[in-house]
Every structure is written in C-alpha cells, then in structure tokens.
Image (cartoon, helix red, strand yellow):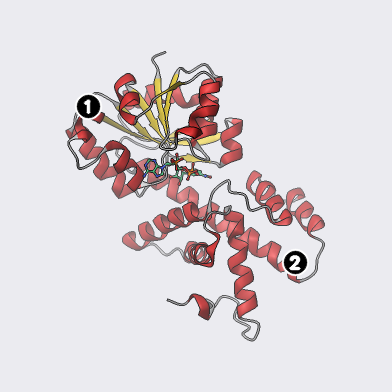
Amino acid sequence: MDRVGFLGLGIMGTPMAMRLAEAGVPLMVWNRDPSRCEPLLRAGAQHGATQDDVLRACRVNLFMLADEHAIDEVLGRGTPDFSRRVAGRVLVFMGTTAPEYATALAADIAAAAGTHVEAPVSGSKVPAEQGRLVAMLAGRADVVDEVEGIIKPMCRSIHRCGSEAGSALKMKLAVNLYLVTTVAALAESVHFAQRQKLDLDTFVSIINAGQMASPVAEIKGAKLRERDFSAQAAIHDVRKNSGFVVSAARSAGIATPMADTADRLYDETVRLGFGDEDMAAVVRAIEHRTESSSDAPDGGRRPAALEE
Ligand SMILES: NC(=O)c1ccc[n+]([C@@H]2O[C@H](COP(=O)([O-])OP(=O)(O)OC[C@H]3O[C@@H](n4cnc5c(N)ncnc54)[C@H](OP(=O)(O)O)[C@@H]3O)[C@@H](O)[C@H]2O)c1
C-alpha cells in the first residue's frame, strides 16, 4: 500500500492513526505540536516536519483537525500555497465542520485539481482506541472505495451517504443531535439523583441494566459518578458541534427544542470556564442553574449571571 498521510493528532487523531499503524498501514504523520507525533513514530510511522512534507509524499491524506480555521490554515486556503498542496491529492476530512463549509472547500479543492472526501466519524476517544468508530463517507464513488479500504481498521462500520460534499456531515449532525441531547439528559438525571440523595452506584447500575443501557450511558455515567471530567470529547468542541446542529436546523426551518436546550447548556458550561473538560461536565451548568435559582421553581430559566 502507498504511504498515507495523517494530519492532526489530538484526542481522536492519535488513536485513529494508531489503529492504522497497528494494522500495517504505512503512515506519514504531522501535527502542529510535533511532540504529539511521538507515539506514532514509536509505532513505525514516518514524521513529516511540515504539512508540505506529508502532502508531497502522500497521495491520500487523512485530516483530523479541530475545526474549519485549522483546516484552512493547514492547507493555506486563500494563499498561493493552497493549489500546490492539494493538486493531485485525495484529501479526506474526518473532523466535524459545518456542511456548507465542506461544500465550499470541496469546490476550491476541485478547482485546484484535488479530490475532496468527507469522512466524519461517530464515537469518541474510547471507540477510537478500540477501532470501533462509525464512519460516514461522501465523495466520488471510486475514491470513496479506496478511502473505505484505508480507514477500515479504525471503524466498526462505514456508511455511504452520497457523493455530494456536505451529505456525510449532515448525517453526522443528525447523529450528533442524539448524542448531545442524550449526554445532557444523562447529566441531568445524575444531578437529580444526587440532589435527591440517592445512591449513585445503584442509580448507574440500574441505567446500565435496563433499556437505556448503551456504551455512551456506561462511559459517561461512570465519569459523572466519579466526577472524572478528563476530556474524551471536550465541552468547547461539543458546543461547536451542537451549534452546527441548531444553526442547520434554523436555516432549514426545523424545530429542535431538545438540541436548543442542550446547546444552551454546553454554552453555559463553556462560559462557566469548563470548556476543556469532558462533555459530561455539562452537569456543571445544570448544577449552576440549581444553585442560582433556589428561589425560582423554573429550573429551565437561564441563571441571571449568564444572561447576555
Ligand atoms: N473528541 C470526540 O469525541 C470527537 C468525536 C468525533 C469527531 N470529533 C471531531 O474531530 C475533530 C478533532 O477532535 P479532537 O477531539 O481530536 O480535537 P483535539 O484533541 O482538540 O485535536 C485538535 C487537533 O487539531 C489541531 N489544530 C488545532 N488548531 C490548529 C491550527 N490552527 N493549525 C494546525 N493544527 C491545528 C491540533 O493540533 P495541536 O496538537 O498542535 O494543538 C490537534 O491535532 C473535531 O472536528 C471534532 O469535532 C471529535
């Protein structure tokens, strides 16, 4: 197999690239902070000192960068470097961006004789470590065939969502809507159980034994019980993604009352100063509401301290 480029070794990128390395996919890796490349280099990957080294050496390149700004910066979008970096390359974007951003980026890449593929993933740090992500693919059918073969070792399943840019990301937003509301609801349940002075071990055991059991309930339930808010999916990133959901819903005139509430709670958590913690820390916004509305029975009201 030709060497594959991997750019962006954060919470998700590192375990994803590790799965590929362990499956024998020859890799060249690059990260803005080079120290994060070390585990991959120990696993046999080559190091690109710059993104240009990787893009020169590899025809197919996987990107797991934070956001749209990071992608534009790494590709030099809007500068003369952009065409040189993307021409003749297959660029596979696995992070979460707004669908309309992906449409515009795909057009720019096509104009510079490159090929854009969208491959956002559902699943967090633990599924990434286990090679159990769920990928959604969009792009030209023959290229998507090739990309599917490359990313298989990091995925439990791969789903084709169409050929148009934006179509896999719209699917990802629909899936994320369920995730962000589910984790906010679980945090609220734990908070309710705590304030009712219920035994949390018993509460979590009942959730895990019943119909609502799921990998998310198991992992986030344990984090909430332990108050272990080390990030698997950081609040600021989850807030970015819940923002994509509600803004896509507003543009299309779709009612999303649950997502709207969850989005406000993640936003409040960021504003309380917990943006780097795990998404389970959304419980902090709910606690803050309880503490600041002890005289108001309407727990759904935003606390005055956070009013714009
Ligand atoms: N965490 C999850 O559960 C999860 C699940 C599915 C999808 N996602 C999506 O996957 C993407 C990555 O998430 P993550 O949790 O891995 O994020 P992360 O840990 O914050 O990693 C972000 C990566 O982007 C790089 N980066 C940020 N700004 C940059 C810039 N201006 N120039 C170059 N590189 C830049 C970082 O490099 P440095 O190391 O140098 O900072 C790092 O490699 C996001 O779009 C996220 O929404 C996350």
53, 204: nearer the viewer: 53
Q: Which quadrant of the figure shows ligand 1? A: top left
Q: Residue 261's spot in the image, x, y percent? A: 51, 67
Q: Which residue is mark 2?
A: 194
Which residue lies at the image location 19% right of the left edge and 40% below the top edge?
79
In the picture, measured across the screen, residue 294 lies left or right of residue 157, that is: right
Which residue lies at the image location 65% right of the left edge and 82% below the top edge?
294
Residue 87, located in which quarter of the rendered image?
top left
Q: Residue 160's spot in the image, x, y percent? A: 41, 34
In the picture, measured across the screen, residue 170 lies left or right of residue 109, that is: right
Secondary structure beneath disc 2?
helix
- Pointer 2 local density, CA inside 10 Å: few below 14, some 14–19, many at least 20: some
Q: Residue 37's spot in the image, x, y percent? A: 49, 30
Which residue lies at the image location 80% right of the left edge and 65% below the top edge?
198
Give the residue type at disc 2: Gln
Q: Vertically, is 7 above or below 281? A: above
- On residue 248, the disc is none
- On residue 87, the disc is 1
Dot 1 or dot 2: first in sequence order is 1
Quadrant where the C terminus lies?
Answer: bottom left
Which residue lies at the image location 44% right of the left edge and 45% below the top edge?
172
- Alpha carbons under labels 1 and 2: distance apart: 56 Å
